[in-house]
Image (cartoon, rainbow, N blue to C red):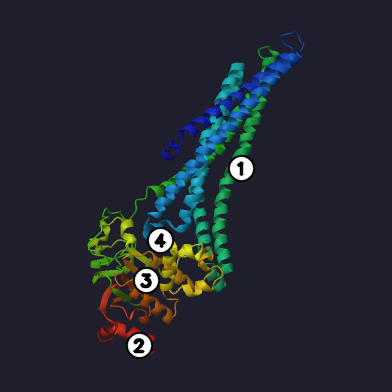
């Protein structure tokens, strides 16, 4: 992922350089304080007579160095934030772009909640890691190494204190991190679970209310949240044990420095100022080690999150992009040749089995059959939401697998079973698939979809704002807005996947009548549960257990297809 940081290399270099400046200023301070104590206060070089001038001079130097160090720290923070935030911004956009290239199969595999977590929380963890490397890593290791070196230049016996303390510190850090590291990936998975439950309940809010399942969903969310909290507490408990142990080691080291320093002062080998400086240096060094624990925690979480983001970035799209972008000789023709299809992970259970059918340009074809017979799977193969298991699907005499995906899907406009409405105005929702459409084209699409009537009754008309998921609209209104969007795209093939189920028969009949008059050359595929929705189609395909049972007009099928006749009689209450 360093390629995302490469664009901001200047900031990524300047940040640690300024941090070096800040740390150097911190390391100079104990030396200056030592001089103030030894010469300014005790006057060791002046027969025990202190010097106010030395105190003021060295004190002024300390203030100047503090200002320089503070300025360096500020600049380090500015540059590290610029680099890490832009790194996260680019990474987040690329991850989202990759997700947008996924097939339905891959989106289902990751789950919506997990993808949300990866784009948000996981990338935030990576940003923290990058920032920590540029700031915390440099500061911690410079203070640790610099503190030891400066302390040993005062007296080698002080180095012996660090040499004794360091193994205990290392053992403590390694032990606790080995316990915590496996929990970080688990923690992110638990967060996925919370996001999944939250996403399902927000999108299905009305269903939850309608079935009075608030208490059930509260328990389900509570269970997921408790698992997240339990995992988080396990991590925090591990580090809560480590902190006091590290403090004990630090305080014992300070006591040892004072003891060694007292012996050395009595022997005349070091000065009291040196002892004070040594105490500061040992505190800086061991505090740096303690900060390493937080640094390693951030690194461990960042690495775990990086693996999860890489799973998305390295995931090859299941639907491979073709290269065909030319304009074919025919427009709107669809052909299924020996097509069989099974959903990934479902084994050999075929949803469609040996389908052979040609749908000609400009033809209106209805698809009818009992629930689960493969109607939606049939139309999902045309825009390559899934790829066939066997055989081939052709659009305009070209195998859909040879098309550039954008080029293929521009030819096809689909109104899905579930009307996806965005939190925007009605106009924006209709124009979503064709942002360059004129006002006249938008209104014309709404007229055909029978949506103008209810839109004109609203106070703001086409500027009426729709709530998220279209909850401010009725089911029929949402379907008409979605159908308007489908029509406005002006594609060669229109697919209506049971998208008029919430419309009354008259509104539905007016919609298909206007479509036939306004778009006679456009191929139209209508999936429906009601015979009334497809009886005027040029041909009707009857599917039964993934196979084509019969094909013909309404009148022909009444005479030749028992399945069609049974559906017809059941819907008209005939025996």
Name the N-terminal-most of marks 3 and 1: 1
Residues under numbered marks 4 and 3 in contact, where contact means CB atoms less than 8 Å apart: no
Name the N-terminal-most of marks 1 and 2: 1
Q: Position of residue 537 (x, y in %)?
A: 31, 78
- The residue at which mark 4 appears reads as 434
Residue at 51% across, 44% down? 125
- The residue at which mark 2 appears reads as 569
Which quadrant of the view contains residue 168? Answer: top right
Whether residue 167 appears in this view of the structure is no
Which disc is residue 166 wearing? none
Quick one: quadrant of the N terminus?
A: top left
Disc 1 from disc 2: Cα separation: 72 Å
- The residue at which mark 3 appears reads as 496
Which disc is residue 240 wearing? 1
Mark closer to the observer (4, 1): 4
Residue at 55% across, 61% down? 221
Residues under numbered marks 4 and 1 in contact, where contact means CB atoms less than 8 Å apart: no
Residue at 41% across, 39% down? 3
Name the N-terminal-most of marks 4 and 3: 4
Vertical placement of residue 536 versus 267, above or below: below
Name the N-terminal-most of marks 4 and 2: 4
Label 4: element kind: loop
Crowd tier of the residue under label 4, counting other residues whose Cα lies within 10 Å: few below 14, some 14–19, many 20 or above: some
């Amino acid at each position: 992922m360093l390629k995302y940081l490469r664009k901001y290399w200047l900031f990524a270099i300047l940040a640690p350089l300024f941090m070096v400046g800040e740390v150097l200023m911190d390391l100079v301070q104990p030396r200056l304080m030592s001089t103030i104590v030894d010469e300014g206060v005790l006057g060791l070089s002046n027969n025990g007579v202190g010097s106010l001038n030395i105190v003021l001079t060295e004190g002024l130097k300390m203030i100047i160095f503090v200002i320089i160090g503070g300025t360096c720290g500020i600049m380090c923070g500015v540059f590290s934030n610029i680099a890490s935030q832009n790194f996260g911004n680019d990474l987040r956009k690329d991850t989202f772009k990759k997700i947008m290239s996924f097939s339905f199969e891959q989106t289902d595999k990751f789950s919506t909640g997990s993808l949300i977590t990866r784009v948000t929380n996981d990338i935030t963890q990576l940003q923290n890691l990058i920032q920590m490397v540029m700031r915390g890593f440099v500061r911690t290791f410079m203070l640790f190494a610099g503190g030891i070196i400066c302390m040993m230049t005062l007296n080698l016996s002080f180095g012996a204190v660090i040499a004794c303390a360091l193994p205990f510190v290392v053992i403590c850090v390694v032990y606790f991190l080995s316990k915590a590291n496996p929990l970080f990936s688990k923690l992110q998975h638990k967060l996925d679970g919370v996001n999944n439950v939250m996403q399902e309940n927000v999108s299905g809010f009305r269903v939850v209310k309608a079935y009075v399942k608030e208490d059930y969903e509260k328990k389900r969310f509570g269970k997921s949240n408790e698992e997240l909290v339990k995992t988080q507490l396990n991590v925090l408990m591990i580090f809560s044990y480590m902190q006091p142990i590290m403090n004990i080691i630090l305080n014992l080291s300070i006591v040892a420095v004072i003891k060694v320093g007292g012996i050395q002062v009595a022997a005349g080998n070091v000065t009291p100022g040196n002892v004070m400086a040594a105490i500061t240096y040992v505190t800086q060094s061991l505090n740096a080690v303690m900060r390493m624990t937080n640094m390693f925690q951030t690194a461990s979480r960042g690495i775990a999150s990086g693996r999860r983001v890489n799973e998305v970035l390295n995931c090859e799209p299941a639907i491979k992009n073709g290269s065909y972008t030319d304009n074919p000789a025919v427009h709107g023709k669809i052909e299924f040749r020996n097509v069989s299809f099974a959903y990934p992970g479902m084994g050999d259970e075929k949803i469609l089995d040996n389908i052979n059918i040609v749908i000609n340009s400009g033809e209106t074809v209805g698809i009818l059959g009992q629930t689960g017979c493969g109607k939606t799977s049939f139309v999902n193969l045309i825009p390559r939401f899934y790829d066939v298991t066997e055989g081939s699907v052709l659009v305009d005499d070209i195998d859909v697998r040879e098309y550039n995906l954008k080029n293929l899907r521009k030819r096809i406009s689909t109104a899905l079973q579930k009307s996806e409405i965005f939190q925007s105005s009605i106009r924006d929702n209709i124009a979503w698939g064709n942002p360059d459409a004129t006002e006249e084209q938008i209104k014309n699409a709404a007229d055909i979809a029978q949506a103008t009537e209810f839109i004109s009754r609203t106070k703001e008309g086409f500027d009426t704002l729709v709530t998220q998921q279209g909850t401010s609209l009725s089911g029929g209104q949402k379907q008409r807005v979605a159908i308007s969007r489908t029509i406005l795209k002006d594609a060669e093939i229109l697919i209506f996947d049971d998208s008029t189920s919430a419309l009354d028969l008259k509104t539905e009949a007016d919609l298909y009548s206007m479509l036939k008059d306004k778009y006679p050359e456009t191929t139209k595929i209508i999936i429906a549960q009601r015979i009334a929705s497809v009886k005027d189609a040029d041909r009707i395909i009857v599917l039964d257990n993934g196979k084509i049972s019969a094909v013909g007009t309404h009148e022909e099928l009444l005479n030749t297809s028992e399945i069609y006749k049974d559906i017809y009689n059941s819907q008209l209450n005939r025996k």
